[in-house]
Image (cartoon, rainbow, N blue to C red):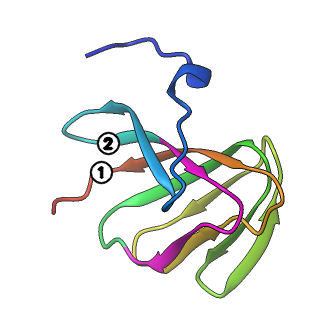
Amino acid sequence: MERFRKIAEAIQFSSGKMKKNSLFETERLFCDLYCFEPGQAQNPHIHEGSDKIYFVVQGKGLFRVGEDERELDERQIVIAPSGEKHGVSNPGPDRLVLLVVMAPKPVH
């Protein structure tokens, strides 16, 4: 496993849907970059037993956690605790890049 990564080298987008780019993964957590083109979204969903953190690396996004919805800018962060419905959208006009950490890693 690589221990050191350059975020800029891991940024990749997909025209079809939001793209998840893995940075690190262990038995206990994952750390990804989520890359959104304008108009793309991550549908609201719930993780039981796992907490998720979103950190805005680039752009602006609209975040929903539970009943709260807020636009976050670069270098802002939010947590979606276990059991809380959460999702992200990029209303545009710019691209959105998020650093996402989730622990413990969900079992699928």
Q: Is 5 or 80 nearer to us in this picture?
A: 5
Q: Is 67 or 45 nearer to us in this picture?
A: 45
- What residue is rendered at 56% in x and 33% in y? 11
Cβ atoms under marks 2 and 1 closer than 8 Å? yes
97 relative to 83, above or below: above
57 relative to 102, above or below: above
Residue 70: % across, % down: 78, 72
User: For residue 5: magenta?
Assistant: no
Q: In the rendered structure, which amino acid carries the disc numbered 1?
A: Pro
Q: Quadrant of the N terminus?
A: top left
Q: Disc 1 marks which residue?
A: 104
- What residue is rendered at 27% in x and 51% in y? 105
User: For residue 37: magenta?
Assistant: yes
25 relative position to 93: left or right? left
106 relative to 21, above or below: below
Q: Quadrant of the C terminus?
A: bottom left
Q: Residue furthest bottom?
A: 67
Residue 89: % across, % down: 65, 69
Q: Which residues are magenta?
A: 33-46
Q: In the rendered structure, which amino acid carries the disc numbered 2?
A: Leu
Q: Disc 2 marks which residue?
A: 29
- Residue 106 quadrant: bottom left
42 relative to 59, above or below: below
- What residue is rendered at 81% in x and 66% in y? 71
Element type at marker 2?
loop
Q: CA distance from mark 2 to mark 1?
A: 5 Å
40 relative position to 24: left or right? right
Residue 96: % across, % down: 70, 50
